Structure formats: C-alpha cells, structure tokens
Amino acid sequence: MPIRQLPPSVVNKIAAGEVIERPASVVKELVENSLDSGATRIDVAVEEGGVQLVRVVDNGCGIAADELLLAVASHATSKLTDADDLFRVRTLGFRGEALASIAEVSRTLLRSRPGEETGAMQLEVDAGRISPITPAAGPVGTTIEVRDLFFNTPVRRKFLRGTSTEMGHVSEAFTRLALAHPHVHFTLRHNTRMVHELPPSADLLDRISLFFGRELADDLIAVESHDQQVRLAGYVARPSQSRSHPRMQYLFLNGRFIRDRALGHALSEAFRGLLLGGRYGICFLRIDMPPELVDVNVHPTKLEVRFQDGGRLYSQLLGTLRNKFLSTDLTHRLTPVGPAEPVGLTESQLDAKRRELAEWARAQTTGWRQDSVGGAGEGTGDSADPTGDRLRHAPLTTVRLSQPLGAPAAPIGATSRGDQTSDDVDSAAAFADSNEVSPATSLLDADAGPVRALQMHNRYLIVESGEGMVVIDQHALHERILYEQLREKVLAGAVETQRLLVPEPIDLASNEAAVVLEARDALQQVGIEVEAFGGDTVLMHSYPAMLRRLRPAELLRSLAEPLLAGGRTPDRRDVIDELLHMMSCKAAVKAGDPLTPEEVEALVAQRHLAQDSHHCPHGRPTALVFTREELDRQFKRT
Ligand code: ADP
Ligand code: MG
C-alpha cells in the first residue's frame, strides 16, 4: 500500500482513541480547560452516565469569536508557543488535541463569551463536521456540550458500560479535579439530581469532608514539608483508617492528579507496620514543584509524569510521613459520641450546631441518670459539693467506661486538630473545646519514671500516665516491642540464633516447602537457616533464640502460611517484614497469660522501646487513653 498523509478526521479519531476512553475522559478534558481558563466556578452536568450528554459550564476567560474554529482544530492550543514551553508547562492542557478529538466522536456544541464581549458566539461540530458560527445569548465564560459520545464509532461505543459504571468513572474524575482545586466552586449533576455542590474553600480538608464524610476527615493528620524546590502538603489518615485498595491515595502534582508507582511504593513503606496486610493507607497530598523539574508530556492523559529527581521526591515523601507518624500520638482516644463537629460552617450554622450539641449533652446527662444504679439522679447538676457530686455519679463508672473498652473502634477523638492550620478548622476546634480536645502528648514518655500498672483479666494492663489513664493490650504491646527489637537486630545483622547440633528434617506440604525454600535468604536474615532435603522435606540448621518455645516444624509452618496467603511472590523486604510480624506475634505474651507484677512492670517499662507503641504490627490499637480531663468530665468534676 502506498504511503499517504492521513486526513484530519482519521488523525482526530486516532487521538480520540488515546485521550477519550469514556464520558469521564470528556469530563476531565473539559474541566481541565475550564480550570486553565481561570474559571472560579465550574458546573458539570451529565445525562445517562455522560453517554448521552456531558455539559461543562464555566465563568472563565472565554474564547474569542475568531478563535472558535481553532479551538476545535487539532494541534491548536493557546498554551504553548514553542517546544521549550513543553518543559515548563504551567497549564493542565497543552497538546491542543482534546476538543478536536471529542468533536470528532460526538455531537459537540461550543458556546463562548469573553469578558469584554456583549454576547456569546457558538458553533456546532457533528462528528467532525463544523457548522457556521452564529451569535447566541449567554453569560461570560464557556459552555461545552458533548452529546452521543462515540455515536459514529460503534466499536468504541460498544466498550462503554452501563450508566452506573460510567457515572462512577465520571464521579471519580470529578472528585480528583475538585480535590486538586478546592478554591474553585464546583457542582456535579446527574440527570436531574445534584450529586455534589462544593462551595469554594481555602482548605482541602473541607472538600475531603464533603466527598468522604466527617469520620474520615476527623482522622486525618496534616503533613507538610519543604525540600528546596519541592513542597509537599496535605493530609494523611491515621492508620485506623485504611482500605483494601490504594484508590484513596490521592496525589496531586502541580494541581494535576497523578499516579506514580515509585511514590505509591513510598506510601506503602510509610504505612509499613501500621496496617494489616493487604490494607492501604489513605492520603491526600499535593506536591508542588517548578514545572521544569517534571516532564508531563509522557502520557496522553498526563496521568503519569516523569520526575527529574524521582529518588529525592521518594525520600521526601517517605521521610515526611514516617516522621509524622512517629511524632504523632496514634493512640485511640475515647471521646463521647456527639454530633459531628462542623468544619467551615457559617456563623448561623455554627450556632445551630452549638444548640444541637447542647441538646445532645443534655440528653446524655439524662441517659446517665437513668442508667445510674444509685438512683440519686435528681441532683441539679450544678451542685457545688464535690463529695456529693462524686457519690451521685459513682455507679456510672462502669456504664460509661466499660462499653467503649470492648469496642476499640469507638469514636476516635479529634486529636489531629493540633496539626491543622486552616482558619476554618481552627474555628471548629475552638468550638469543639467544649467537647474536649486533649493535646496529643505521647504515652511513651521515657522520662516518666516508674509507673503504677495493674493487670486485668489476664489481658489488659491499666497504667497511670501523666495525662490520665492508659489501658494497654498486653499481647499487642509486647508484640510491638518485640517487633521493633527484632527489626533493629535484623537491620544490624545481629539476630541471636540457636544452632541445632543435629539439623532437623521437617516434612512440609509441597507448597509450604516451596515458599520456605524460595524465602531462604530472607529467613536467614531473621536467624532461620534451612536447606532442601529432597521431596518436601526441609532441613533446619538454626532458628532464632526468641522462638525457642516453638517446635521447629510448627515454626516453619506458621512462617509459610502468610507467605502462601500473599499469592504472588512477595519482594524480599515484604517477606522479612512478614517474618518479623509473625515471629513477634508468636513470641509475645498472649491475652490470657497471667503475668507477675514484676512482668507487668517490665513490660510497661519497655513501652518506650516500641517506636509506634500505639498499634501492634497487625495494625490493631495497643492502647486506649482516658485523659484526666475526660475522666473528670465523665464524673462531672468540671
Ligand atoms: P489544550 O487544552 O491542550 O490547549 P484543547 O483541545 O483542550 O487543547 O483546547 C484547545 C484550546 O481551546 C485551548 O488551548 C484554549 O485556548 C481553548 N479552550 C478550550 N476550552 C476552553 C474554555 N473552557 N475556556 C477558554 N478557552 C478554552
Ligand atoms: Mg485541554
């Protein structure tokens, strides 16, 4: 076949194949154009998941009448002038392909009015065929309507899914854009329903709260760091919040949502040891850097980028989060279940919330009186007699405090507040004062001196701390301490091992034998030396001294189990981490093990050794804190 120049319609269809996959892609491209136009308000409306219609209306700079045709021409853009510009892209778009591609595979209407004009002009493009430009009525800004996506490319149309699936994609695209630009007023409508109404906000937290709810927003910790040219800022969720997928890890580079394998890896490293296996942490992080330091022209939809110094960014991200986790008290705190605290509300809304809170507090008090065994509940509540007060409420102790103990997932206090900087949040925190926000001091105070501790039910240790009272899960804490000790030793290559005089042959199931032998190197690092002995038998030469209580066969089988459960071949570091978890779990005291007072004391005295003593390596909390203020309030002493 002779070589021919392709006609523009074919070029556009090819480009559309790359950039426009589904209605969500149309939403993304149109909203990005609106953001580039400087819009402060962007309204998105879709019908039937966007297959029938995607309409984006903005109040941006508009397109001049004599440029309307260029806007829908391919490789026409106002965002680049020469090739050098490609390496300092400050806009979301620059390829000049989106509108041409979209117009090629749909019925598109483009109406626009620049600020200085008195009326709008519009044009329609039907599968690439452009109609004459006509005057129209319309406000300043640009409206683009895209109907019947892929109506002229049946093969692509066939790949579209049902309305709800497509709407899910639209919603995700919208969420990413709106999170990346909180100062812009956004709305999203599906058919006749308003899905999202997002007033402009100075802070990302408000937006997160609107999209994902107060509960998550309350569990976020603000993070920030600067590295000469790179600023990292945003929020990361406490490890008590996690997902089975990494989709809640939002990274925004210079206002653009991105996916990046290396940074994703940095995130899992940061959460290592804080989450259960197979769980992913949640974060909303903005990375801002001079555009020269990143190439955004490596992916048609710019979902992936190439960093000039990826290694440095990796370390910055990992270091920032790791330090934050280590310096933050991740202990679960118990605060009363109250109405959600407002963030970014108006004064009158705040007033309403205050009333709601006061009512709630009254209801709580009434509840206590009814619960009260003593029945002396007629007290007016403003009695000045402290003794009487104490007597009156004494029977309530068990009612109020025993219940949350059994439910570690009970509401976790708003302790992250101290890290947040936005004015909106500050005002909410100030308001929340009545609802108690205690400073996030650590229970790991190494200088705290000797502590009084008591074992309860052979499983919990009750400890007096500077700020109140801590209830510790003995197994979880011990496991955590052993984990950290063991990790240090592995890093230093100094695990104490026990060599067997006569190597012990151990029969395993064939898949067990396979993973154990595959993980030989990692096992050696934790002090377990094994070799193949023919068939499914493995010969063990040594094992870690801390696990001498276990029989070698039992030890190897328990090690094989998590490795098998992992499915694919895990990387070496994962294997070692898995082994550390498993070994510390096996070696730790169990719930139900009675401890002597000396043992209790020794365990509690070592708690500062646990770098993160707030969660066991499985991610469960190790300790619950009852602050003194909290206790005082429960006993009505304040
Ligand atoms: P790109 O965004 O890569 O430049 P597009 O095909 O998306 O390419 O848009 C082509 C041009 O049309 C843009 O460069 C811009 O000048 C103009 N344009 C598109 N949408 C808008 C809008 N909502 N407001 C103002 N100008 C727009
Ligand atoms: Mg564009």
Image: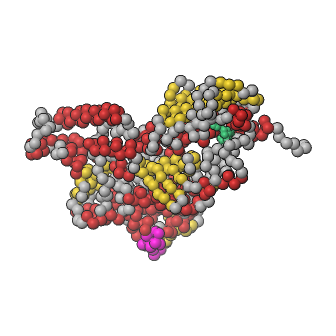
Q: Is residue 453 left or right of residue 319?
A: left
Which residue reaches farthest right?
2
> Per the image, is 104 magenta?
no
Residue 209 showing in the rendered view: yes
Residue at 68% over, 28% down: 122
Image quarter where the N terminus lies is top right
Residue at 61% over, 49% down: 90
Residue at 67% over, 30% down: 110
- Residue 208: x and y in percent read 46, 42
Q: Is residue 530 left or right of residue 304?
A: left
In the image, which residues are magenta? 489-502
Residue at 42% over, 57% down: 324
- Residue 125: x and y in percent read 72, 29
Q: Tell me how the rendering is colored.
A: secondary structure
Relative vertical location of residue 47 with respect to residue 231 in this rendering, above or below: above
- Residue 528: x and y in percent read 48, 68
Image quarter where the C terminus lies is top left
Image quarter where ligand 1 lies: top right
